[in-house]
């Protein structure tokens, strides 16, 4: 995993630095990371996790256009961050989803 500049958030599953978002344990089955530059993010939102929309999915696709990286603690969490990209939207569950969404929004604005 490559860090690009100063890290502004790191909870072990997601890293935000000055260049973009790194989602650890993204790809199945090898659990390698995915890097998303802020310039590729179209929108960032938070979503409440429930029984039918990913709360109990530890890794994989709840819908055809979404992907959840590995997080074994997801069933204990209530809120996810959704990145809208061109095709597949990563949905991940950081420890502080509201803060992560705000930090991403700030950097999206700065990168345009």
Image (tube, helix red, strand yellow):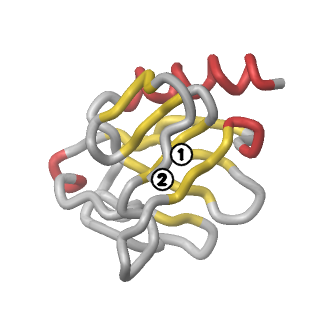
**Image coords of residue 68 (percent x, y):** 43, 62
Rounded to the nearest whole Å, what is the CA distance between mark 1 and mark 2? 5 Å
- The relative height of residue 84 versus residue 9 in the rendered view (above or below) is below
Q: Is mark 2 on a helix, strand or loop?
A: strand
The residue furthest right is 112
Could you tell me residue 107's position as x and y percent?
Answer: 65, 22
User: What is the crowding at mark 2: few (fewer than 14 residues within 10 Å), some, or many (at least 20)?
Assistant: many
Quarter of the image with the C terminus is top right
- The residue depicted at 56 percent of the width and 35 percent of the height is 4
Q: Mark 2 points at which residue?
A: 91
Position of residue 12 relative to residue 26, above or below, is above
Verify CB contact (< 8 Å) between mark 1 and mark 2: yes
User: Residue 75 sits in which quadrant?
Assistant: bottom left
User: What number is the disc on residue 38?
Assistant: none
Is 28 positioned to the left or the right of 51 in the image? right
Q: Which residue is at 41% across, 73% downward?
A: 60
Question: Label 1 neighbourhood size at 10 Å, few (<14), some (14-19), many (20+)?
Answer: many
Residue closer to the observer: 13 or 50: 13
Total numbered labels placed on residues in the image? 2
* Residue drawn at the location 32% of the way across and 47% of the way down: 13
Which sits in the foreground, 96 or 63? Answer: 96
Look at 41% across and 21% down and name the residue there: 99
Q: Mark 2 or mark 1, which is nearer the start of the sequence?
A: 1
Left or right relative to 74: residue 109:
right
Which label is found at residue 82? 1
């Amino acid at each position: 995993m490559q860090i690009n500049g100063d890290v502004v958030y790191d909870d072990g599953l997601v890293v935000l630095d000055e260049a973009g978002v790194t989602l650890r344990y993204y790809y199945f089955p090898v659990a390698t990371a995915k890097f998303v530059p802020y310039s590729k993010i179209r929108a960032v939102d938070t979503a409440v996790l429930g029984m039918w929309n990913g709360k109990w999915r530890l890794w994989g696709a709840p819908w055809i256009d979404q992907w959840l990286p590995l997080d074994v603690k997801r069933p204990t969490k209530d809120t996810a961050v959704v990145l809208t990209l061109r095709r597949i939207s990563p949905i991940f569950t950081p420890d502080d989803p509201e803060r992560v969404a705000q930090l991403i929004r700030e950097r999206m604005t700065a990168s345009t």
